[in-house]
Amino acid sequence: MIGVPGGILDGVRVLELAQNAAIPHCGRLLAGLGADVVKVEPPGGDAMRGLAQLGPLEAKAFAIINPGKRSIAVDLNAEGSREVVDGLFRWADVALVAFKGSDLARYDIGWDHVRTVNPSLVHLTHTPFGPEGPDADQGGYDVLVQGRSGVGFVMNRSSRGVPEPTRPAVNDFGTGMAAAFAVLAGLRHRDLTGEGQRVDASLLGTAMSLGTAVLNFFPGVDAEPIAQFDADLAVAREAGVDFDGQREMYEGRVLAGQGAFRLYFRHYATADGLISVAGLSAGLIARFHEITGLPTPDRSDHTSAEFQSVVAEAEALFTTRTTADWLDILRSAGYPCSPYNMPHEALTDPQVLANDFAVELDHPIFGSYTTTGMPISFERSPSRVPGPSPVFAAHTAEVLAEAGFTADRIAALIENGVVLTAAEE
């Protein structure tokens, strides 16, 4: 058994039937809170075992998404697999299931069947686009909901006139966090009532929630400008205006407060790198101008010559000093700022290390590696990444024995190819 002794979820058994990133990230977080997370992999392993490989069935992508779990391998297409999966559902307190709706029924892993096996189970069901609607049974990935949610239009970078998918996959990992939150609520309900239930999470639901700040409509204020924008956008597209031009139109015409984001809440180049600054209150805006000595422009139109001139002056000013200099100047004046790190630099940032937001793990096959730690901590309960990612199918016999299968039955399941063990690979 792997877990965090004394963690809030110590003793909670989680069955994970999911691949890639979103729901496996949920399992990662639950493991960090003390849960015993058993990952059920197909005979060829989770799809992430094939990305940036470190050896047979070992890869960077899998290692960073799945630390602290146990791995078993089950062929859901094999005769006899229902016996195994039902036994695991009876053993578990929580099931994390990320399959298309049609596959939930095909493999008998959906709540309609599982509730007959273990009615007290919390069954987290994940679908890309939500459990209802015309596309409820469609497969999907983060990039698809970036576009569909409308959030991609605001956050995507562009290349050759079209948007590029945002990385990291914020909706995948955001869904992992939302799903973990949902599981905890489901466990709380079970504690109060003794009842299990189906809990739904989706990439599209996460994307819409993350986009709360820009996904809104107030008829009395927004109807006319948006209607005019739609008409002008059609003309612009007909004229060949590219993505950046279209977004510039949107931000200037529809989104409020863009002037502040162009001057006071952004990243600046410095003499030796980059720095991030953030001050949107009236007091902080005034302080920015006191520090820099720049004139205060009219922010109602960020496309005006006056405003653009001040932005250009600010950009030139920041390049006259190093990042360290600006951090000292801004912080001494109480203006929020921070270093702008590259990904590998973030892993050694003193603030990151002081809070265990990055941790080093030791894998039995490919050795040590650094990955992200837990994003939350508790005063009285441990919260940490409990160990490295599991070797493929290393825990099959162990977990099945805990779920009540006899040694002879486990041996027969292995011999018949229903389940696999690490030794067979």
Image: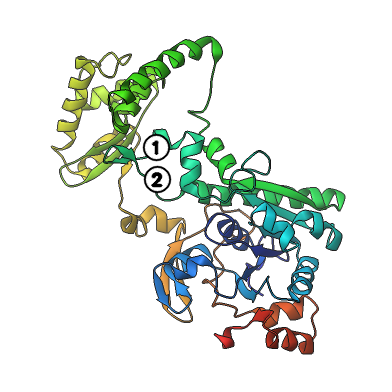
Q: Position of residue 94 (x, y in %)?
A: 73, 59
What amino acid does circle 1 point to?
Met
Q: Residue at x 40, y 33 (%)?
A: 154
Discs 2, 1 touching: Cβ within 8 Å: yes
Q: Identify the secondary structure beneath mark 1.
A: helix
Q: Nearer the viewer, residue 220 or 240?
A: 240
Query: What residue do we see at 15% from left, 38% from top?
Result: 319
Using the image, determine if residue 40 lies above or below residue 306.
Answer: below
Residue 35 located left or right of residue 20:
right
Residue 221 position (above or below residue 134): above
Q: Is residue 73 visible?
A: yes
Q: Amino acid at mark 2?
A: Thr
On residue 166, which mark appears? Answer: 2
Q: Please state the horizontal and vertical placement of residue 270, each as a whole percent of the image.
A: 19, 41
Lower sequence index among marks 2 and 1: 1
Local crowd size for mark 1, using a 10 Å CA cut-off: few (<14), some (14–19), many (≥20):
some
Label 2: how many Cα within 10 Å (few below 14, some 14–19, many 20+): some
At 31% from the left edge and 22% from the top edge, which residue is drawn?
236
Count up the numbered dots: 2
Q: Nearer the viewer, residue 86 or 61?
A: 86
Q: Is residue 35 visible?
A: no
Residue 252 location (% of width, % of height): 34, 20
Say what secondary structure mark 2 lies in: loop
Give the residue pinned by disc 1. 155
Residue 326: name its quadrant.
Answer: top left
Quadrant location of the C terminus? bottom right
Q: How far is mark 2 from mark 1, CA to CA?
A: 7 Å
Residue at the front extreme, as displayed: 238
